[in-house]
Image: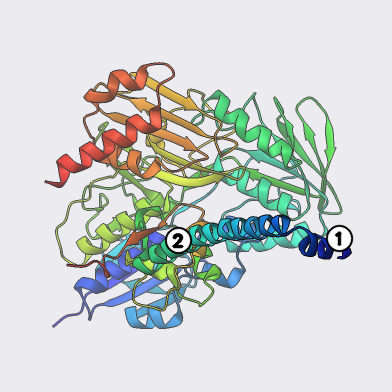
Amino acid sequence: VILRRYVIVGSGAAGIAAIEAIRSQDSRGEISLVAEDQHGYYSRPGLAYLLSKEIPESQLFPFSKQDFKYLQVQWVNAQAVNILPDTHQLGLNDGRLLQYDRLLIATGSKAARVAIPGIELEGSVKLDDLNDVQGIIKLARHGKKAVVVGGGITALEIVEGLCSRGVKVHYFLREDRYWSAVLDESESHVVEERLREEGVEIHYHTEMVEVLGNRGRVVGVRTKKNEVIPCDIVAVAIGVRPRIELAVSTGLKTDRGILVDEHMLTSSEDIFAAGDVGQVLNPHTGKTVLDTLWSPARYQGQYAGLNMSGQIIEFSKQIPYNVTRLAGLTTTIIGSVGGGGRDPDMVGIARGDSESWRDATGVVDRSLIATQSEFDVNRLRLMMGEKKLMGAFLMGDQTLSKLIQQLIIHEADITPIREQLLKPDRPLPDIITNFYNQWQAQNAG
Amino acid sequence: MGERRVGYIGKIGEYEKRVFSVILQYSDVMVNIKVLTQQEKSRRKALVEGYVVPDTTRCVQCGICSFNCPINIDVRRHAWLGEPVKDSHCLTCGQCVLRCPRGVLSFEKTHLFKPR
């Protein structure tokens, strides 16, 4: 019996899910995990909670040594530099060549950088991995003032993390509101108001053009209006880019990410891709899209793993959603929510983001509720198609989030309540809860 | 003190009134205790009958749940595997449910104690 050799590049959610899937089918094959990050497998979304002091660093690691022993994984701490598809080899930066029968590229994404003078100075940071967070924590120990530039979830994670560590934060926005591609105007303003309450100073219509330094360290930034703001930390979170270099140099078909088919297979035989790097078909719109979310990454990794181990199983993209905290408010984003803006703060997709959220194809109506109940902010925005819910945005009270998520994912026909949902002053939560109960009763049988 | 003594030696009617009012107050307290015990009973019943169930698709494995568990159950592992926390010595204290930033965890009824 010839044992199959699997090589996984990347130790994130997709890579680990693939390994688990492979092991569930093939208990004897050799699995090598090529991990560039010396910390191995940890929760990247958890980094925000490490920064905000909610968990200690040791808590970031979901798997123990024993778990990896059980999965029989060979760890290779190196960077993959090239693929030789003809001989089925993977080249590493230490000169070694790994032989593979099936290869998975799950290299994730990395922060997009801005090309402005001084950005390489000490004190200029991004939030990609554990090393970055360790660096930010170290800087925040002595730092008093920070400038944060960018948008999306990551920028806020940095802003709030620094705030909780006693750093005065100046947050730059290029135009007049936060995350305009996903949030609508009042939602942006709710977030901004809460940031101000935390002591964040928001600078609208402000663009950083230079980082000023002294003896190699950040001492301030210069804006386009030629204003100088002194600071010791500059953080940039203008979006992420899938790490497709390996695929590009190998000649695999790529676009913004690596193009994969429904088996997570790239354009080359025996090479698969999953996670942030994978650009997959959205069956609802027919376009291929990127997701930078944990759950889709895991799901894609699982399917890649199963197909690598010889199963033939088709991946079908789920409706992407994320539950996150924006300025301390629990927020759920499901399906198409397009905020209408073009978001000048971002150059690409953010972390914890999905390209499909911006796509408003099929949305014909919006239904909105903003109430003040036991939560000081409570917001629900429904995006409606002709017959079904296309997306939803919930901020504050999350009672309805699971119901709405089910209705959207299972494409429930909302015709019976469509009229009601659009009436002004209607009790939206009751309508939805009642409808959900009926719908569930019908579908249970 | 002195007045009270004069009160119940001199005017029996006053004393009786006072006794009645004490009894009345006491019965109020009794009612409150009853309500409280009922609430506590239903709360404990809910806890005993309930167990923590994860929604795997919401989980990002940050570990806040496991970190806050008073008896060190690895709740995160359950969330990864999509398994309810029912095997262990879970106190159903709700710390993990409340602290999860992404609404992964919720209480569900086990139906373990339902008469068949």
The kind of residue tagged 1 is: Glu
Could one spot residue A89 in this view of the protein? Answer: no
In three-dimensional space, the C-alpha distance between marks 2 and 1, rounded to whole angstroms, equals: 41 Å
Q: Is residue A304 left or right of residue B15?
A: left
The kind of residue tagged 2 is: Gln
Residue with the mark numbered 1 = B3
Secondary structure at numbered mark 1 = helix
Q: Is residue A425 left or right of residue A178?
A: left
Q: Quadrant of the N terminus of chain B?
A: bottom right
Q: Is residue A416 left or right of residue A324?
A: left
What numbered label is drawn on residue A120?
A: none
Q: Are marks 2 and 1 on the same chain?
A: yes
x, y (%) of residue A246? 41, 55
In the displayed structure, would residue A95 be above or below residue A110?
below
**What colour scheme was applied to this rendering of the protein?**
rainbow
What residue is rendered at 51% in x and 30% in y?
A183
Q: Quadrant of the C terminus of chain B?
A: bottom left
x, y (%) of residue A282? 28, 38
Q: Given the image, what chain letter belongs to the residue carrying mark 1?
A: B
The quarter of the picture where residue A289 lies is top left
Q: Are marks 2 and 1 in contact (CB under 8 Å)?
A: no
What residue is rendered at 62% in x and 42% in y?
A327
What numbered label is drawn on residue B38?
A: 2
Secondary structure at numbered mark 2 = helix
Could one spot residue B67 in this view of the protein? Answer: yes
The residue lying toward the viewer, choosing from A69 and A402, is: A402
x, y (%) of residue A235? 69, 46
Give neighbour class at mark 1: few <14, some 14-19, many 20+ (Cα, 10 Å).
Answer: few
